[in-house]
Image (spheres, grey):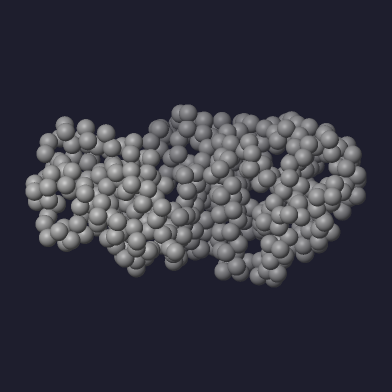
Amino acid sequence: MSKNLYLTGFMGSGKSTCGRLIASFLKAPFVDLDLLIERLNGMSIPQLFESEGEAGFRKVEKEALSRVVELESSIVALGGGSLLDRENLFRVKRSGKVVYLACEPHAVWRRIKAGSARPLARNKQETLALLRSREEMYREAADLVIDTTYKLPVQVVEELLTWSHARSVIGGEIFSEFDSVSRVMFGSGRLTELLRREFGGRRTPFILSTPLVWSLWEHLLRDAFAGELRVHLVPDGEAAKTWETAGRVIDWLAEEGAGRSDCLLVFGGGAAGDLGGFAASLYMRGIEVYQVPTTLLAQVDSSVGGKTAVNHARGKNLVGSFHVPKATMVDTALLASLPERVYREGLAEVAKTYLLDGMDALEELASLKEELIARDTRVLDRVVRRCVVKKMQVVRNDLLDRGERMLLNLGHTFAHALEKVSGYGQFLHGEAVSVGLVWASRVGQQLGLFSHAARVREILADLGLPTGWSGRAEDILDAMKMDKKDGKIIVPTDAGGAKVLSALQSAETIRAVVALGG
């Protein structure tokens, strides 16, 4: 059974208007509960209040709602007080998802005061007191909250359409994925449109990019924003992830007069995203950041989930924060210009994500090798979205990386150690992850947890990725001691998923595995 999508909120929040728009977009049925009540009873809502009183109206409302909850795949605009009744709330939650369209009091009164015949909107003081009394109820009921105060109805609908539950609630193709932690917008060849939809001429972000990326794609951003752009360029790659570079970004924001209401848009790969997110998290105790990832690795992993960092002499990403992007915009058409090596390193993060779903999933990825190497956009779109959704599902339950999210570090403790030991230059991050996946698989096999280490290595090699290193195992072990994951390693298991182990307790196994080289 498909579920309904219920819009709740105070009068004037836009439930009916937005409900009609989203239903039109999705070609789904739409029910305005108040209008249904009027039609069922042959009276307007004010007439019902006058003849039956509020208690009588609520009884009529409950009867109408009992019909609505039996519908499927419908958009429903509830009345402002429909969910005050706990039985109504239970029925609605059981039969669908609830979106609370919030609105600040001053905007509520402005919207409803002119010519309003609403029986519960007789004067400003009483009306706003009623809103405040219901706020907790609305938030308790909501699966998603959208603030409509400064948005046009079409902007509210667009944000609603990005919600990940929209697919399971209504069905059909959606534009984006959304949850309480992350919002990721997809559009192959549509970056300018994504930016216009998100910003809509309301403000122009400060832009952080790298010289090569900006030279290649500057025109897309200039097409999206009117007027002069404020742009700051930082070095490519891990060389950008330093305290000094972060300080220069913050200096630039201050010199340009960026305020708390401004935002930073990071247009680049994973390193630029890490740096920009970190600087945004520090400036004025945090300004909004948008991520526009331009590499495969950043699109499937680093741009989603809010981890930001710069490197330290003692280890990779040792100085950082959690600062979730306001939105991430993924355009796989940007991958067409990537150097082959930079493109392929992203396939290691893709392989990691598929391996976390088990060997059957990794074999599915292996079957797409030719299309992936050819950068087939249809296949890339599907693969990238799968990786993003997987990460979002994990991150929403463990934003701060203290439990389930640690499993996303499969291969990464090894990778970070390898990058440090080799001087942040011999291996790109994704290449180090590839080697780390091989080592993690071998450790899992040595400990009897995993049986497919050789096949993992073969698949990674077929994707054009490195699978070994000829240095000293002791150097890797020493570097792992300073890893921010407290000396833990993640290894795949035959049951699917992964298991967290102590690197110290597994030291002999790690030493033997690394010593194998390639």
Residue 135 image point, x, y percent:
31, 37
The residue nearer to you, when weighing 497 against 374, is 497
Q: Is residue 450 visible?
A: yes
Residue 78 image point, x, y percent:
28, 52
Report the residue at 36% width, 51% height from top.
91
Q: Is residue 275 left or right of residue 171?
A: right
Question: Relative to 426, is 161 above or below?
Answer: below
Q: Is residue 404 left or right of residue 414?
A: left
Residue 164 image point, x, y percent:
47, 55
Q: Is residue 222 visible?
A: no
Report the residue at 29% width, 42% height from top.
84
Question: Relative to 212, is 455 above or below?
Answer: below
Q: Quadrant of residue 296?
A: bottom right
Report the residue at 58% width, 40% height from top.
398
Report the residue at 63% width, 59% height from top.
338
Question: Relative to 460, is 407 above or below?
Answer: above
